Image: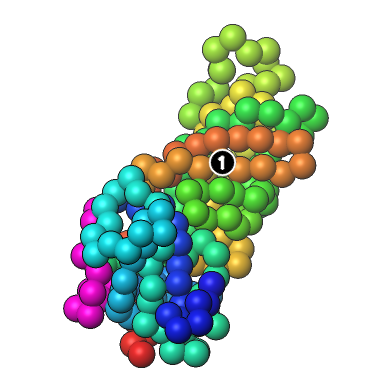
Amino acid sequence: FNVPGVGAVVSGFVNAGQLQVGSNCHVYVGPTDDGSFMKTVAKSAHIARINTAHVTAGQSACLALALNKDMKRRLRRGMVVLEESPTSTRQFDAEICVLKGEGTTIRRSYQAYVHILNVRQSAFAKSIEIVNHNAAGLPPSHAATADADEEAGSIVLRPGSRAKVKFEFSQRPEYIRPGMRMLFRDGRVRGVGIITAVPDSGPAPIIVK
């Protein structure tokens, strides 16, 4: 949001690390719709409406950023503020478990709305690999199965199934890391998972004021 006399202000939870704000505190904000990050300065910070020069992991803080008008227009919900090594990706691997979804089958090209920490975006499954062919304690109709043409990649997931899935975001790149937990939903379908790998796409493009 924009505060008169201050400029662009962002708020959120400090997930890891620490930051010493000031005129020499250069940070990267993004990713934007094209996967790039904006390089700027974190001028000041507030925690519980109290001015502070230092924020650390576990705190909820607001940061005042030195952004020009073009950069302000690029801001959106779900962005991250990083001190170094900004990267963005459209693809990621995850190990998932389908919790709910009676009467629904999940197969390649299945699309769902994905929640990963601050990320909220639809993604589709590019490939599916079964983890357990016989889910313990579940009837055969609920176990992960493969159709007769499994060679063509027609693997079907149902409630109780566990699988390794390669997802691709449908709209724009996002900043995610291995180990992050995810939740996906689509109508009556609910599932959880953990990100196991993110392709190494190299440093993201940087936009400098």
Residue 39 percent across, percent down from the top left: 33, 80
Residue 20 falls within the magenta-colored stretch:
yes
Residue 39 drawn above or below residue 142: below
Mark 1 Cα-neighbour bin, 10 Å: few <14, some 14–19, many ≥20: some
Three-letter code for the amino acid on which mark 1 is drawn? Leu
Residue 22 falls within the magenta-colored stretch:
yes
Question: Can residue 148 be seen at all in this image of the molecule?
Answer: no
Residue 151 percent across, percent down from the top left: 59, 41
Boundaries of the magenta span: 17-27
Residue in the image at 53% along x and 52% along y: 167
The furthest residue to the top: 137
Closer to the camera in the image, 189 or 154 = 189
Closer to the camera in the image, 125 or 32 = 32
Quarter of the image with the C terminus is bottom left
Closer to the camera in the image, 89 or 146 = 89
Residue in the image at 77% along x and 42% along y: 187
Closer to the camera in the image, 119 or 108 = 119
Residue 93 percent across, percent down from the top left: 45, 48
Which residue is labeled 1 in the image? Answer: 183
Residue 14 drawn above or below residue 53: above
Residue in the image at 66% along x and 35% along y: 190
Quarter of the image with the N terminus is bottom right
Determine whether the residue tagged by mark 1 lies in a helix, strand or loop: strand
Position of 138 compared to 199: left or right? Answer: right
Residue 181 percent across, percent down from the top left: 45, 41
The furthest residue to the right: 103
Position of 185 compared to 81: left or right? Answer: right
